[in-house]
Structure formats: C-alpha cells, structure tokens
Image (cartoon, helix red, strand yellow):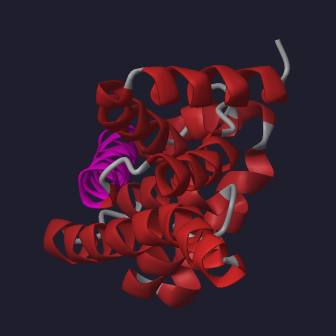
C-alpha cells in the first residue's frame, strides 16, 4: 500500500462516514506530533487532503480543528514526557537510534530558541516531534512547555486544515 492508497482510503472513509472525521483527525495529528511515530506516519499530506474534503463536503470545520489541535497537543505532551522520563536514553531508541542527526538538530534548535523553539518547531517537518522530546530531556519547565504547546497546536491545526476547508469554498464561489 502506497501513500496515495492511504490518502484515498482515509478520504473515502471520512467521506462515507463523517462521524469518523474527528477521531481520524485526532489520531493523525497525534501521530504527526509524537516522537518516533511521526517519522513513520505521513499525516501532514493526509490532513491537508482532509482539509479539502471538509471544504467540499460541508463537514463542520471547528470540531475537526479541535480534534487536530488536541491530537497535536497530546502528541507533543507525550513526547515531552518521554524525553523528561528517559533523558539521554531516547537517543538509543528506534527510530532515533537510526537517525541521530534529528536529535542533534532538535537540540540545537531548542537551545537557540527555547520556548519559542517549542512553538515554531511544530511547523518544521521532522523537528515537529523531536523538539518537544528535547524540551523534556532538557527539563524545560512544564508550564512554559504547555503554553507553547497549546498555542502552537491551535495555530498548526488551523494552518493545516483551513486552506483546504476555506480555500475550496472561496475558490468555488469566486469561479461561479
């Protein structure tokens, strides 16, 4: 099964069973934000596609946005906890043990930007799940981490879903 098959299957499932949109989006955003799993799950492309599906099908945007924000929030929170609990041992866990440069890049990003690194790290591909992990490894204060986490999760969820959800509606109205 290739990426296109996965995208088509998820899109068709949501199209035929709109009630599944919220748990599917939550799971995808959670997986996209969770250290280790985000390196294996191509959720960004699927979420962008689901944004377009929301726009064309009339699925309510805000509950799906809330699911994406919550999934992203909890994925980063768990990544932070793993880093805090396991500290430097995470470098020896798969798949980071096969990609040690990700942890090094995440650490450099975090050291340079601190709390802002937690916020902005969500918007940079592989750093998305590694930076919260590094925040935990570096014992970043929980409150500062969670403020950046919740804020970035809400902005990221909007940014990944809104172009498709609102762009399709705007484009079809403009073309009419």
Q: Along the horizontal axis of the image, is 126 left or right of 54?
A: right
Q: Does the magenta stretch include residue 74?
A: yes
Which residue in the rendered view is the most extreme toward the top?
1
- Residue 170 lies in what quarter of the image? bottom right
Q: Does the magenta stretch include residue 44?
A: no
Compared to 107, does 51 lie above or below?
above
The N terminus - image quarter: top right
- Residue 61 lies in what quarter of the image? bottom left
Measured as percent of width and height from the top left, residue 144 is found at 22, 78
Which residue corresponds to the image point at 24% horizontal and 52% vertical from the top-left?
Answer: 63
Q: Can residue 93 be seen in this view?
A: no
Q: Give the range drawn in magenta.
A: 62-86
- Residue 73 lies in what quarter of the image? bottom left
Q: Along the horizontal axis of the image, is 145 left or right of 119?
A: left
Which residue corresponds to the image point at 37% horizontal and 51% vertical from the top-left?
Answer: 68
Give the camera-side residue of 83 and 16. 16
The C terminus - image quarter: bottom right
**Magenta stretch prevailing secondary structure:** helix
Which residue corresponds to the image point at 69% horizontal and 47% vertical from the top-left?
Answer: 45
Compared to 12, does 134 lie above or below?
below
Compared to 155, does 142 lie above or below?
above
């Amino acid at each position: 099964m290739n990426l296109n098959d996965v995208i088509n299957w998820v899109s068709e499932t949501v199209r035929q069973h709109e009630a599944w949109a919220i748990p599917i989006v939550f799971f995808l955003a959670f997986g996209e934000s969770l250290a280790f799993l985000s390196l294996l799950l191509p959720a960004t492309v699927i979420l962008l596609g689901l944004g377009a599906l929301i726009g064309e099908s009339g699925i309510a945007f805000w509950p799906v946005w809330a699911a994406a924000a919550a999934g992203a929030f909890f994925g980063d929170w768990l990544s932070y906890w793993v880093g805090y609990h396991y500290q430097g041992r995470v470098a020896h866990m798969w798949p980071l043990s096969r990609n040690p440069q990700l942890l090094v890049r995440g650490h450099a990003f975090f050291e340079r930007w601190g709390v802002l690194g937690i916020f902005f790290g969500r918007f940079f591909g592989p750093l998305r799940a590694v930076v919260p992990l590094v925040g935990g490894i570096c014992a970043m204060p929980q409150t500062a981490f969670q403020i950046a986490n919740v804020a970035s999760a809400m902005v990221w969820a909007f940014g990944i879903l809104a172009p498709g959800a609102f762009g399709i509606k705007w484009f079809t109205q403009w073309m009419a």
